[in-house]
Amino acid sequence: ARGAWVGPGAGGPGRRFRGPPHPGLPSQSSAPLIGAMARQGADKYSKLGEAAFAKMEKVNADILCLTYGSLVTQLLRDTEDVDAVNAQLEKMGYRIGLRIVDEFLAKSGIGACQDFRETADVVARVALRMFLGVSAEVVMWNKELTACSFVLPDNPLAEYVELPAHLTNRLWYSNLLCGVVRGALEQLQLRVECRFQKDVLHGDEHNLIRLELKEVMREDYGDDD
């Protein structure tokens, strides 16, 4: 069995990630040290992800796969527009993401992240492990450290799935995941773009999700009067 989004957590804002992303790349002389620190951070978050996963109620992976497959199939029947189904799946995930942040913060033990690079590690190694039962590798950073990619070696939503030819390279079957990431980070005042770039269902070697920071939003507490 794996962990899964079996239902949204309590709504409401959670603690915020601190500060803007790292402004630039490390110098060549500091790169080995930075790399070692990054590996230590990855190990730390992997352990936190395992601990958080252990706290979650589990749902059978086959049931999860079949239930999600039924949802996608029904959307295709109702809409008959692949692009609209992609958008609908992302929107559904976005609503889930907005509502699971409190549960994540309560059960993961994660505090405020210092920059977007750390945030991406937390999403890949803790959040995905906690809610989906799998972890991702974080790769392909841009030079500003505001965009990266997640490599998902396994995708429980897409097990046993084979797309018909007319949906290959058109339907992003697991687009719900991108919406969840976008919604959760927006609840933490980070406006991001999250999209699938590669999918094993399309014949690609890996599942690849691109994550790009668009804005660090400011909280508006309103007028005290």
Image (cartoon, rainbow, N blue to C red):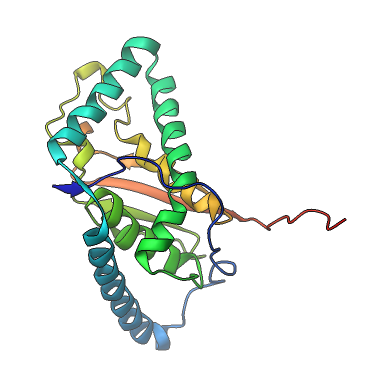
Q: In this view, does 66 lie above or below 149?
A: above
Q: Is residue 66 left or right of residue 49?
A: left
Q: Going by the picture, which residue comes out furthest to the right?
A: 225
Residue 87 in view here: yes
* 60 versus 37 height, above or below: above
Residue sitting nearer the eye, 187 or 124: 187
Residue at 41 percent across and 62 percent down: it is 106
Picture quadrant where residue 32 is located? bottom left
Q: Count numbered badges in the picture.
A: 0
Residue positioned 21% across, 61% down in the render: 54
Q: Which residue is at a point 38% across and 69% down the rendered structure image?
A: 109
Q: Give the image location of residue 74, x and y in percent.
A: 30, 16
Quadrant, the C terminus? bottom right
Asked whether, in this view, residue 172 is left or right of residue 183, the answer is left
Relative to 133, is 7 on the left or the right?
right
| Residue at 28%, 63% in the rendered image | 52
The answer to whether one can see residue 141 in this image is no
Task: Establish if 90 lies above or below 54.
Answer: above
**Quadrant of residue 166 within the rendered picture:** top left
Q: Where is residue 12 in the image (x, y as percent from the top left)?
A: 55, 50
Image position of 140 with respect to 182: above or below = below
Q: Position of residue 104 (x, y in %)?
A: 39, 57
Camera-nearest residue between 214 and 144: 214
Residue 165 image offset from top left, x and y in percent? 20, 18
Q: Quadrant of residue 110?
A: bottom left
